[in-house]
Amino acid sequence: MFGFLVQRVLAAIPTLFIISLIVFSLQQLLPGDPALVIGGGEASPEMLAQIREQYGFNDPFLVQYWHWITNVMQGDFGVSFRTREEIGPMLAAKIPVTLTLATAAMLVSLVIGIPAGILAAIWRGRGWDHAVTVAALSGISIPNFWLGIMMILLFAVHLGWLPASGYVSFFDDPIQSIRTLIMPAIVLGAGLAAAMMRHTRSAMLTVMRQDYVRTARAKGVAEKTVILKHAFLNAQIPIITLATLQFGTLLAGAVLTEQVFSIPGVGKMVVDAVFNREYQAVQAVTLLSGAAFVLMSLLADVLYFVANPKLRTKTL
């Protein structure tokens, strides 16, 4: 197991390096002059030249990248040009918020999507299968921001059951924290649950056609055991793949949902950074997003190893 993890971590290092290079390169292509953002529109040419020299904007590309990546490796993502705050602590304060929202949305996706997919596979071609398929297509098609606005109008404005926006830490007020998370978690989790349902249904149908499932039924094994032990356990790999990718997407920041519900997470941070032309903050969030996907890929590899006994007997 340890050797398996070491191999996957070593394989992830070049990927992270390539991601960082792409992130820094794309930032260089953005329109506008960062010196103008720092100095302001009324800055003199002499002041702009001094700013470019101070921040290394005149250095060659590789020199700028080297300074940036070495600082990032030490946890230094730079300083906000507008507020003069360090970006690292700002980002560290946003990550727990997005992580909490992502976890809640992922729970909604798993709790709804997996059971619905299993039942749709069992009752293939029947009323439940058609109903779940329609619900899944609706969940995938409905935009998050529209669903969020509709839920705010219904549950916050008309019924007054839930707060319309905001975020409260679970450690400060657990009840209020859950109340503020219910609507954004459902908004994010609905689309993910729809994709999870269709993926689970497809994986279950594939496995239920296998000979070992027919053999188990022929031996008189209880149908519940056939479905949960023989079929579902062998359908886990594609479900794990989708779940880890979905969670990586959520960790990257649910931009629209955080904007609609005024949740101070990573997604809202990157939107504000783009509007304010905070290049350093955009770089930090984008690099974090790439690292989140790499981390989720590593987690998927570990879960494959745990879920599939055959992998434990092979040299990886």
Image (cartoon, grey):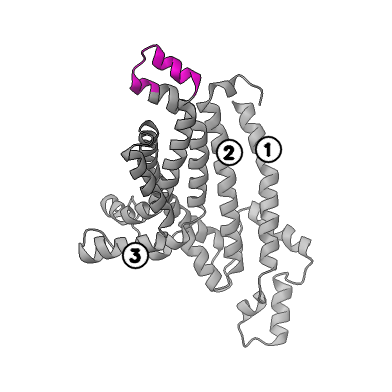
Q: Residue at x 33, y 54 (%)?
A: 181
Q: Is residue 81 left or right of residue 94?
A: right
Q: Which mark is residue 298?
A: 2
Residue mark closest to the camera, 1 vs 2: 2
**Majority SS type along the magenta span:** helix
The answer to whether any part of residue 49 appears in the image is yes
Density class for disc 1 (Cα within 10 Å; few <14, some 14-19, many ≥20) is few
Mark 1 residue type: Leu
Disc 3 element = helix
Can you name the residue that lies furthest to the right here?
60
* Residue 316 falls in image quadrant: top right
Specify which label sits upstream in the sequence, 1 or 2.
1
Residue for badge 1: 10
Whole-percent x and y of residue 228? 39, 25
Residue for badge 3: 149
- Region rendered in magenta: 210-226
Residue 216 is a magenta residue: yes
Residue mark closest to the camera, 3 vs 1: 3
Q: Residue at x 35, y 33 (%)?
A: 123
